[in-house]
Image (cartoon, rainbow, N blue to C red):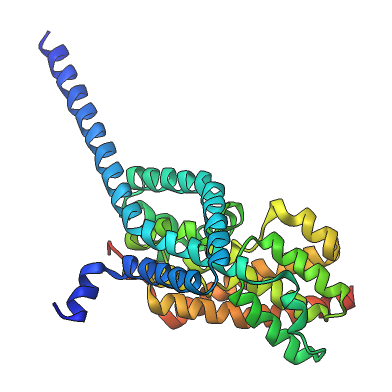
Amino acid sequence: MSLRTLLAKIGSTRLFLLIVLLIYLIVGAVNLALMWESLLNFFQLVLKILPVLVLVFGLMFLSNLFLDARKALKYLGKKSGVRGWALAIITGILSTGPIYMWYPLLADLKEKGMRASLIATFLYNRAVKIPLMPVMIYYFGWKFTLVLTFYMIMFSVINGFVVERIVGENKEVLK
Amino acid sequence: MWIKDDKSKVNGAKNMDTSLKIKRSLVKTIRSFKVSIPILLGVLLLISLITTATPKDFYAKIFTGNYIIDSLVGAIFGSVAAGNPMTSYIIGGELLKEGVSLIAVTAFILAWVTVGMVQLPAEIVMLGKRFSLTRNLISFVSAIIIAVLTVLTMELL
């Protein structure tokens, strides 16, 4: 079996996990304590993000159940207009947990016709963390927090436009 | 009687249709999740390794005192760093106390939350290479621009 066939059989997602596990083995050979401590942190992290994983699974199930390609295009496609932008900004700000937990749902919505610009805008607004604002205010002051939040929301839209301009629009499922 | 029979037939067909739809949605969701799980596990393992291996005082040592270089350094290390955004606020607060410029610290905390080098492989697999690379590159540049704009606005207010 050639290397290319083997890689195709493993698949890119499993290959990435295998590479990371290999890195762990190398780290373990050099510094066993670091490897165990990292693994312990990993298990704590998994326990912490489990509720978000359940939330994303639930949202994906609901979107598969109620949001067909036609509806997705209406709310998140090219003709979604200001409503689409507002939806991407608000849901981006309100979404909780780590950014990578939202990739599967976004990949699903992309397949249904969600605009690349709205995906980029959603992901950028994940940086606006309302529950963490008191911490930011404590360290940097309320003026800094307000100004930074304003610029982040403004740039989320600019980034969305620029990303779509460079990448091009998603091929829509329905014409 | 016949009308009643027809109505129950229609209702039965509707129920069948709904349960089939739920089953199909569930199967599709599980299938999508099965594809995502290995990559999510990989990202989580990588993040755990990086956060464990990086000492908290590491970031204080990398800044030079030059505004322009420091904002670039802040954005670069913020992009590579991983973990809870609250950690970036705490590190940022400590860096300010140690005399690092606000522009550099802002670029650092912004890149921490908007650019993800560690999760980039996951983003590429799920959302596409061109999209992910472009998005992260633009977010990196934005982190520096926003940092400058924020500090300038703060001085005006």
The residue at the far left in this view is: B2
The total of numbered circles placed on residues is 0
Quadrant location of the C terminus of chain A in the rendered image: bottom left
Residue A85 in view of the camera: no
Residue B156 in view of the camera: yes
Q: Image quarter for residue B114?
A: bottom right
The residue at the far top in this view is: B1
Q: Residue at x 52, y 58 (%)?
A: A39
- Give how far across and how far down residue A78 sits, in percent: 41, 66
Q: Nearer the viewer, residue B42 or A56?
A: B42
Taking the image as shown, residue B146 lies to the left or right of residue A107, namely: right
- Determine whether B62 is above or below A48 in the image: below
- Determine whether B154 is above or below A50 in the image: below
- Give how far across and how far down residue A117 sits, in percent: 48, 70
Q: Residue at x 32, y 53 (%)?
A: B34
- Give how far across and how far down residue B31 sits, in percent: 28, 51
- Give how far across and how far down residue B97 sits, in percent: 88, 73
Quadrant location of the N terminus of chain A in the rendered image: bottom left
Q: Nearer the viewer, residue B113 or A146?
A: B113
Q: Residue at x 40, y 73 (%)?
A: B124
Q: Nearer the viewer, residue A112 or A49?
A: A49
Q: Image quarter for residue A108?
A: bottom left
Q: Nearer the viewer, residue A125 or B31?
A: B31
Taking the image as shown, residue A55 lies to the left or right of residue B68, namely: left
Taking the image as shown, residue B19 lies to the left or right of residue B52, namely: left
Q: Residue at x 72, y 55 (%)?
A: A132
